[in-house]
Amino acid sequence: MKKFAVAIDGPSGAGKSSIAKALAKKLNIIYVDTGAIYRTVGLYVYRHNVDSKDEDSIIAMLSDISVSLDYVDGVQHIFLNGEDVSDLIRTETISRYASDVSAIPEVRAFLLNLQRDMAKENSVIMDGRDIGTVVLPDAEVKIFLTASAEVRARRRFKELTEKGETVTFDEVLAAIITRDRNDSSRATAPLKAADDAVILDNSDINASETLDRVIDIIRSKTAE
Ligand code: DC
């Protein structure tokens, strides 16, 4: 089959990464989790005690940051200056840092080629906020996966408490609403569906039904 790209965008907690991981396995292509890239920059900023909204300091730090990706048994690992930080970036604090640093145009420009290069050589399924609009505007398949904030908060709350993080549902919901607002209202590459994306709201369907719908969308788009 010819090389192709599947772009999945949408707000936090819509289930993009679970769907993308399952699909990558099924289609035997690479899954690129672009949120991890922003989280890695967020982690660097956090570790250096710089405020996540201090744009000038963050821009000045970019030349000290190297982000790279590697795949071990098909699973993405992300490296910050050579250190595997794949697990360290999955906290609520780093989620907030990632959302803030991702609003800075220089940060987005700094990370753009890394993302595009992944799709140059390989068929990919890439998830994020601006994949269909900015990173891979020519992707063969574009899906905007969304769900209500309450449903997404419920899923995220379950995930966090299973991991042992002590949070309340209200805190998780408030964090999701704030991140939605940040991600959608920023001037550069805001979270929005590409004009040619298929919008899939999975508030009322489960993960396996979502996967079936996504597979149907890919089949119909790649057959066109
Ligand atoms: O998908 P995630 O929750 O891991 O993403 C973390 C943050 O990174 C999210 O709040 C917005 C930002 N992000 C982005 O701006 N563009 C992307 N393509 C992916 C993530």
Image (tube, rainbow, N blue to C red):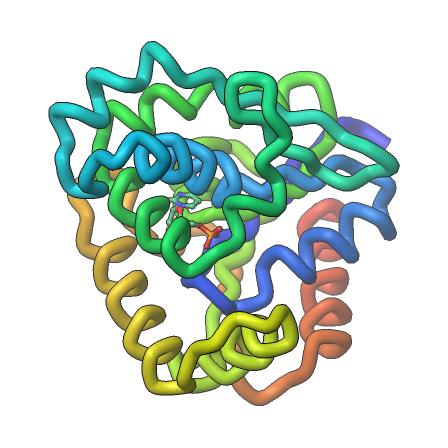
Q: Is residue 69 above or below residue 186?
A: above
Q: Residue at x 63, y 38 (%)?
A: 32
Q: Quadrant of the N terminus?
A: top right
Q: Residue at x 28, y 54 (%)?
A: 183
Q: Is residue 27 above or below residue 64?
A: below
Instruction: Locate residue 3 relative to residue 144 in the image: left or right.
Output: right
Determine the residue located farthest toward the top in the rendered image.
63
Total numbered labels placed on residues in the image: 0
Quarter where residue 211 is shown: bottom right
Q: Give the camera-side residue of 213 and 124.
A: 124
Instruction: Locate residue 172 relative to residue 74 in the image: left or right.
Output: left
Q: Name the spot of residue 120 as percent of width and height, x first.
A: 63, 18
Q: Name the spot of residue 81 as percent of width and height, x first.
A: 52, 18
Q: Name the spot of residue 150 as percent of width and height, x first.
A: 41, 85
Q: Would residue 137 be visible to someone looking at this image?
A: no
Q: Is residue 152 above or below residue 137?
A: below
Q: Residue at x 61, y 46 (%)?
A: 87
Q: Is residue 2 above or below residue 220?
A: above
Q: Would residue 209 be visible to someone looking at this image?
A: yes
Q: Name the spot of residue 152 as percent of width and height, x first.
A: 48, 77
Instruction: Locate residue 191 relative to residue 119 in the image: left or right.
Output: left
Quarter where residue 164 is shown: bottom right
Q: Residue at x 86, y 41 (%)?
A: 28
Q: Give the camera-side residue of 13 and 138.
A: 13
Instruction: Locate residue 69 relative to residue 138 in the image: left or right.
Output: right
